Amino acid sequence: MDLDIHHLRMVCTMAEAGSVTQAAARMGMSQPAMSNQLRRVEEMVGGELFVRSRSGLEPTPLGDQVISRARTVLSELDALFGDLHGTSGAQGVLGLGSVHLACVASIVAQVAAALPDREIALRIESSSALLADALARGHLDAALLGFMEGFDMPLTAPVVSRTLVPRYPIYVALTASHRLAGQKEIRLAELQDEYWIGPPGADDGSLASLRAACRAAGFEPSMRYEAPSGAANPLVAAGHGVRLVDPSWPAHPGTVVLPLTGEPQIAKLLVAWRRDRLADEQAAALYRGLATAFGEHVDNHPAFGTWWRAHPEVHPFL
């Protein structure tokens, strides 16, 4: 048996669902059939792709490599077939949405350079769910969406998407006077006695992902505060709580931002657009502009810059 696209989708679905049962239901397969196919795929690649843990299926190191490459292949194929069945888009103002990332200013400049015939109107949200809804309702033409691993949101035609960054780690911010502030990285279990500031975009799966990771580390996080991304900075600086942050943000004054050991929190970025609003060549130009904008900020945090260069498989396709 040769490895085919179906197997790649199956492996990715299992990683996202966290269980064979849920993955089989998503793909319209029986659980025994999926388990049998997984064993055959593992025979072909030469090792186990998943192990079972208290929180469900967990990819092995080999599984992480296969899943990362499978997602890249699938995103490129989805883009290819989308290009082959494209429609022409309208000119004028481009209604663009983005999750709250460090690169939002660069997005305006780089997308404007990539699409010189379009004016850019940018809407920034904490929630990808709100942006996806705006796309579906036609209130936006395109958006840069972010999701925690395993919490993808289905998009319906005429909205299509292409993966920009298939996986990257989320870091933690804490006050500069914290007892752990001088470490190079922090184990999640070391934060079990901290108060947490709820992650923005909780409806995107960020809160559920944080709770699951903390439980896997042996504790239940104490969610004491809720605040939008920027509004949480003074709370962290004053030592009232810790919070998850995108690693491309520079540390706010009075805070430090550190990697989490073992990467227990993983996010991904997607470019989504309405095919009735953007022509194929416009969507490709938008993708390149967003990729360039994100890449300009990977060195905002030295540790993330180092991680980025050590993982070329996650770089946007330019």
Image (spheres, rainbow, N blue to C red):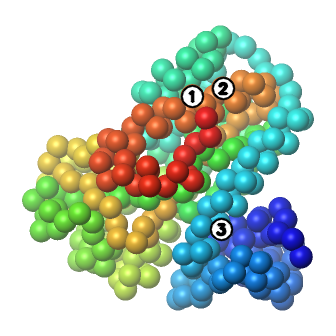
Q: Earlier in the sequence, mark 1 or mark 3?
A: 3
Question: Which residue matches tag 3?
Answer: 66
Question: Which residue matches tag 2?
Answer: 285
Toward the viewer: 159 or 63?
63
Toward the viewer: 130 or 67?
67
Q: CA distance from mark 1 to mark 3?
A: 28 Å
Disc 2 element? helix
- Residue 284, visible in the rendered structure: yes
Residue 3 position, x and y percent, is 82, 69
Question: Which residue matches tag 1?
Answer: 289
Disc 1 element? helix
Residue drawn 44% across and 27% down?
A: 106
Looking at the rendered image, the disc whose residue lies closer to the viewer, 1 or 3, is 3
Residue drawn 19% across and 51% down?
A: 255
Q: Amino acid at mark 1?
A: Gly
- Residue 222 is tagged as none
- The reply to whether the C-beta atoms of the residues labelled 1 and 3 are less than 8 Å apart is no
Toward the viewer: 247 or 41?
41
Disc 3 element? helix
Residue 52 position, x and y percent, is 59, 88
Q: Amino acid at mark 3?
A: Val
